[in-house]
Image (spheres, rainbow, N blue to C red):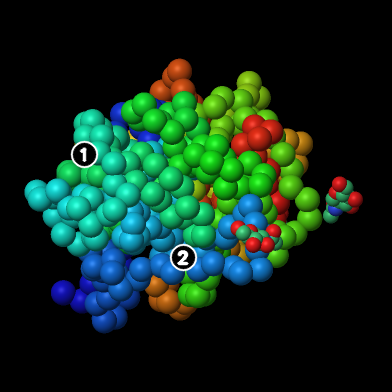
Amino acid sequence: MGHYHKAITIFLICSSFLYPPTNGYIKIKLKKLKPNHPSRVMSLTESSHSVRARGEINPNEPNGSDIVLLKNFMDTQYYGEIGIGTPPQMFTVVYDTGSSNLWVPSSKCFFSMSCYVHPKYSSRMSKTYMRNGQYAEISYGSGSISGFFSKDTVKVGDLVIKEQEFIEATTEPGVAFMSGKFDGILGLGFKEIYVGNATPVWDNMVQQGLVKDPVFSFWLNRDANEEKGGEIVFGGVDPDHYKGNHTFVPITQKGYWQFDLDDVLINGKSTGYCQNGCSAIADSGTSLIAGPTSVITEINKAIGVETFAGQLQSKSEELSDRSLGTMGVSGVDCANVSSMPNISFAIGGKEFVLSPHEYLVKVGEDDQASCVSGFMPLDIPPPHGPIWILGDVFMGCYHTIFDYGNLRVGFAKAA
Ligand SMILES: *[C@@H]1O[C@H](CO)[C@@H](O)[C@H](O)[C@H]1NC(C)=O
Ligand SMILES: *[C@@H]1O[C@H](CO)[C@@H](O)[C@H](O)[C@H]1NC(C)=O
Ligand SMILES: *[C@@H]1O[C@H](CO)[C@@H](O)[C@H](O)[C@H]1NC(C)=O
Ligand SMILES: *[C@@H]1O[C@H](CO)[C@@H](O)[C@H](O)[C@H]1NC(C)=O
């Protein structure tokens, strides 16, 4: 064959109140130019067991806050460990600020391949399990799940949440979640977008008095080779992972962590797109930055995407026509980094700059790396849209405080 294939999986895990669900995640194979390079496919279907995260506890943390360490897979998936039940059954989850439910695969999941490559929750093995049984179904940008509600003790880091509702997933159709390094999703969005009639994990943490301050904060490492992939502090902020002060903006609509975006700039020059106001959400479950096609096209053109668009092959059997039409991931030549522009977002009167090194996602090793633009087009129709989704590419660069008590988000340069 002689082709040099590499693949990257881009997740879009905000819940799909925003837009109709697509047929799955986005997986693009990048075909390298050099034909005689050894074949090296990033396996995306290997068992997740080998990369289970360790939910380490920092003994120096004062009571009322807790640090959860995250693993970083290729700068596109960040996940950490939780325990459900007594004794705790361990799962890795994406801590997703773009949705509000918690789900893990169920031992009663028999017909989805995905359930066979991930650990499954068994209520029979838990002394604290409480039955509910109500049917539940959730759609994300990257696929859907269905199952039923159960209640049990959930352990996040050192915090023990009692009688937490969660979904035992019995179907995870398609390949979307099979290729994930994570087993389930723990939503950190507001109750307003919770599917079902119960209380999200974070609300319970606050209500059960487990956190001193009603805030949590994210640091995502953008060096996928480092041991520490990132961390979430529940109940506080880790001063080791940001520089300067945070710029705070109010939440404009409870549901997602949604706020006003004042401008989008290319090399300091306004695109003019936000003259009549723009809205954005901070979404840890989405790998890239997604925005309206018109602006994203302009940005990607400035980055130099167009030249290399021809090298992209999408795996069409995994992408519905609709997702092909509304989503796209674009490859660029890594060698051109030095000539690429800065892209910035004006938020709360401050410019948050992303340099090419910060907005490109690298696939593969240094001199043979392929690069993917961190900007992807996604048109969300009114009334919710248009809306920008500032995913891991942005949050990796800017440490983010989710201030639930004061209904605001804050960004500061990550360190
Ligand atoms: C934390 O709580 C434990 C009991 O839950 C107590 O023994 C300990 O002194 C507390 N530590 C701090 C720093 O407040
Ligand atoms: C951060 O804010 C404090 C006041 O709240 C101020 O004294 C300090 O100079 C600020 N630091 C920076 C780096 O702007
Ligand atoms: C990328 O770099 C090559 C040479 O290194 C150059 O010919 C080409 O014009 C560059 N493309 C862009 C979009 O800057
Ligand atoms: C891009 O931003 C960096 C700082 O983040 C700055 O040093 C550099 O001069 C900027 N480049 C351009 C072309 O504005």
Q: Which residue is mark 1?
A: 147
What amino acid is found at the position of numbered circle 2 in the picture? Gly
- Residue at 61%, 47% (x, y): give it: 211
Locate the C terminus by quadrant: bottom right
What amino acid is found at the position of numbered circle 1 in the picture? Gly
Residue 252 sits in quarter: top right
Position of 360 relative to 224 (above/below): above
Position of 127 relative to 201 (above/below): below
**Gap between marks 2 and 1 measured at Cα:** 26 Å
Q: Position of residue 329 (x, y in %)?
A: 38, 50
Residue 20 sits in quarter: top left
Does the closest atom of ligand 1 sit within 8 Å of the Cβ of label 2? no
Q: Secondary structure at mark 1?
A: strand
Q: Residues within 10 Å of mark 1 (few under 14, many from 20)?
A: many
Residue 79 sits in quarter: bottom left
Which mark, by number, is residue 55? 2
- Residue at 14%, 55% (x, y): give it: 113
Q: Is residue 153 left or right of residue 116?
A: right
> Image quadrant of ligand 4?
bottom right
Between 216 and 41, the one lying in front of the other is: 216
- Residue at 29%, 47% (x, y): give it: 129
Q: Residues within 10 Å of mark 2 (few under 14, many from 20)?
A: many
Position of 374 relative to 101 (above/below): below
- Residue at 47%, 52% (x, y): give it: 160
Q: Secondary structure at mark 2?
A: loop
Q: Position of residue 116 (x, y in %)?
A: 16, 59
Q: Position of residue 170 (x, y in %)?
A: 18, 44
Outermost top residue: 383
